[in-house]
């Protein structure tokens, strides 16, 4: 396994464990995050503060969350994480595949792209 694949697995494990401080520490202060779609979390977030706001909105709208990691792929400067995602609130649910592609530099994520298998269904769910 490439060292960056092992590192991304650890990053994902921090998120799963609810260690958001450890999770966010793995991102550059000036990280750029692209979230596909037109929902309330879609668009471009620049910096950790903006990224945290995106995650807060996601958590507020997601309800019960389950992520099943499918694969982690990486080389010296890029990584890909694939998950099966289940989200459920009282009024709606979403199931699908989520992909996050990242640039890695200096031991941190400097840029990330997040997308969902059915972007339109996800947009409707998150609103």
Image (tube, rainbow, N blue to C red):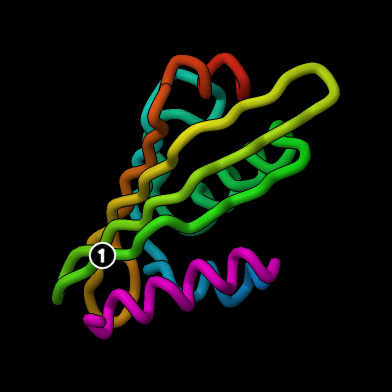
Question: From the viewer's perspective, is residue 104 above or below residue 100?
Answer: below
Q: Residue at horizontal 61%, vertical 27%?
A: 94
Question: From the viewer's perspective, is residue 108 above or below residue 102?
Answer: below
Q: Where does the image place residue 127, in percent across and percent down from the top left?
A: 61, 18
**Magenta region: which residues?**
1-18
Q: Which of 93 and 37 is in front in this view?
A: 93
Q: How crowded is mark 1: few (under 14 residues within 10 Å), some or many (20 or more)?
A: some
Q: Where does the image place residue 86, in percent across and percent down from the top left?
A: 62, 38
Residue 15 inside the magenta-drawn segment: yes
Q: Where does the image place residue 70, in percent across and percent down from the top left?
A: 42, 56
Q: Where does the image place residue 105, in percent across and percent down from the top left?
A: 22, 74
SS at mark 1 in the image: strand
Q: Residue at horizontal 19%, vertical 64%?
A: 78
Q: Residue at horizontal 73%, vertical 19%?
A: 92
Q: Name the residue under label 1.
A: 73
Count up the numbered dots.
1
Q: Residue at horizontal 37%, vertical 68%?
A: 28
Q: Locate residue 31 relative to residue 65 in the image: left or right.
A: left
Q: Which residue lies furthest to the left in this view?
A: 76
Q: Locate residue 71 relative to residue 90 in the image: left or right.
A: left
Give the prevailing secondary structure in the magenta stretch: helix
Q: Which residue lies furthest to the right in this view?
A: 90
Question: From the viewer's perspective, is residue 107 above or below residue 64?
Answer: below
Q: Nearer the viewer, residue 71 or 113?
A: 71
> Which of the 4 image quadrants contains residue 43?
top left
Q: Locate residue 101 relative to residue 93 in the image: left or right.
A: left
Question: From the viewer's perspective, is residue 124 above or below residue 6?
Answer: above
Q: Locate residue 26 relative to residue 76 in the image: left or right.
A: right
Quarter of the figure with the N terminus: bottom left
């Amino acid at each position: 396994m490439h060292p960056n694949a092992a590192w991304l697995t650890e990053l994902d494990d921090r998120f799963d464990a609810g260690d958001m401080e450890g999770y966010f520490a793995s991102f550059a202060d000036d990280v750029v995050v692209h979230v596909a779609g037109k929902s309330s979390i879609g668009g471009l977030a620049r910096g950790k503060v903006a990224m945290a706001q995106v995650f807060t909105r996601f958590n507020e709208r997601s309800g019960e969350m389950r992520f099943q990691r499918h694969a982690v792929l990486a080389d010296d400067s890029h990584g890909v994480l694939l998950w099966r995602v289940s989200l459920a609130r009282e009024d709606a649910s979403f199931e699908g595949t989520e992909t996050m592609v990242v640039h890695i530099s200096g031991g941190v994520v400097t840029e990330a792209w997040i997308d969902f298998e059915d972007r339109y269904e996800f947009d409707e769910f998150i609103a």
